[in-house]
Image (tube, rainbow, N blue to C red):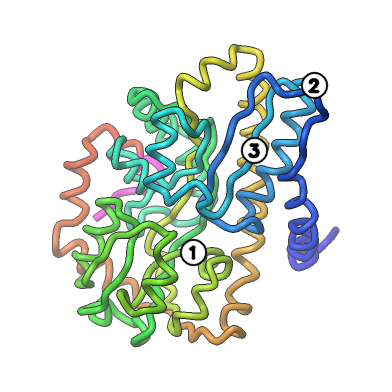
């Protein structure tokens, strides 16, 4: 039985090879009936993209060449908000989107990121593959967007900055922290005392490099593939919120596939989600040591001070009212009482 380290090595070795599949071209006269695009905001070696390429090959084979899915990684089609606009207009057929960005149209999708809610990654999957996820998919569908059955994993988020270690909540005071533009993220870090600047990930590296912002918060995997260790010194382990991605489709383009192709795509999207989760988990587990060897200084934050601040500022009460009793009830079914 291979160790996790061996599995991780095999994943990295395979990433370069599978990346070549993005250039797969049908022979003349064999054009697919449906040629759809999928956009992501991460580089080619991210598990999201590596597994999309593998899924795309399976889809082409299993549909007898009728359905071709072409990947556009690393913001090639624009930042998150631009790709989301393209998807809603039909210019882009599929997109992997964070709940924080999706919440601009489906506000309750922010609920996946309620801080200090989930106890572990398995606890997240219980909720998002269970009743909470089913409730959210209904809300997404109601906005004319087709969600795939299972979410992708991005991991728990950590705080980094170039000024000082964040040991307690007081160390956030005055720091210019970038967050995604979702309302929950912005409210969370404002409540914790930081100066918050919302921006898309495509703008982040330059903003850190030029000190437009002091820091940001993301899972280990994003610190690595985004090379944020080059422009950030301190990483404070907070595990303050879980982050995952929905795979969504333009509703009209999804309907155009018809039942048989939809069934094949759906089955492959489920396999894709579980493969991506496994690879993402293996990669995140390996990166703590690597990031420190690349110069980042790690510390474990006292998250009890964060939780106390949120409770004192009625953060959870405020967001329970925002999301509504039904959605909050589904969340607490898996997390226990919050606040």
Q: Earlier in the sequence, mark 1 or mark 2?
A: 2
The nearer-to-camera label among 1 and 2 is: 2
Picture layout, residue 8 above or below residue 24: below
Residue 311's quadrant in the figure? bottom left
The nearer-to-camera label among 2 and 3 is: 2
The residue wearing badge 3 is 70
Residue 218's quadrant in the figure? bottom left
The answer to which of 2 and 249 lies nearer the viewer is 249
Q: Earlier in the sequence, mark 1 or mark 3?
A: 3
Q: Residue at x 51, y 80 (%)?
A: 230
The residue wearing badge 1 is 219
Residue furthest toward the top?
Answer: 259
Residue furthest toward the front?
Answer: 28
The answer to which of 186 and 332 lies nearer the viewer is 186
The residue wearing badge 2 is 29
Judge from the rendering whether residue 202 lies leftward or rightward of residue 55; answer left or right. left
Judge from the rendering whether residue 11 lies leftward or rightward of residue 175; answer left or right. right
Magenta stretch: give its range.
331-339
Across the whole image, how many numbered discs are drawn on residues?
A: 3
């Amino acid at each position: 039985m291979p160790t996790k380290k061996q599995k991780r090595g095999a994943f990295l070795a395979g990433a370069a090879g599978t990346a070549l599949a993005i250039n797969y071209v049908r022979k003349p006269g064999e054009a697919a009936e449906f040629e759809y695009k999928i956009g992501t905001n991460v580089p080619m070696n991210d598990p999201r993209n590596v597994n999309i390429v593998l899924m795309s090959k399976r889809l082409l084979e299993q549909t007898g060449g009728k359905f071709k899915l072409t990947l556009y990684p690393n913001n090639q089609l624009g930042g998150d908000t631009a790709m989301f606009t393209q998807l809603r207009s039909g210019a882009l057929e599929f997109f992997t989107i964070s709940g924080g960005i999706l919440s601009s149209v489906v506000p309750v999708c922010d609920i996946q990121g309620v801080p200090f809610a989930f106890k572990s990654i398995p606890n997240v999957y219980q909720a998002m593959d269970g009743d909470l996820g089913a409730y959210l998919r209904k809300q997404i569908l109601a906005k004319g967007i087709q969600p795939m059955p299972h979410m992708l994993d991005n991991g728990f988020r950590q705080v980094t900055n170039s000024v000082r270690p964040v040991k307690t909540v007081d160390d956030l005071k005055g720091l210019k922290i970038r967050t995604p533009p979702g309302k929950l993220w912005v409210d969370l870090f404002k409540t914790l005392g930081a100066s918050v600047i919302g921006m898309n990930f495509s703008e982040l590296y330059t903003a850190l490099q030029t000190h437009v912002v002091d820091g940001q918060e993301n899972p280990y995997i994003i610190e690595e593939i985004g090379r944020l260790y080059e422009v950030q010194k301190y990483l404070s382990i907070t595990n303050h919120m879980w982050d995952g991605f929905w795979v969504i489709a333009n509703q009209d383009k999804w309907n155009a596939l018809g039942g048989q192709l939809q069934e094949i795509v759906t089955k492959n999207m489920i396999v894709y989600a579980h493969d991506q989760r496994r690879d993402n988990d293996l990669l995140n587990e390996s990166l703590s040591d690597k990031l420190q060897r690349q110069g980042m200084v790690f510390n474990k934050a006292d998250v009890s001070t964060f939780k106390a601040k949120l409770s004192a500022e009625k953060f959870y009460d405020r967001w329970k009212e925002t999301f509504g009793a039904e959605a909050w009830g589904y969340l607490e079914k898996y997390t226990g009482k919050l606040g």
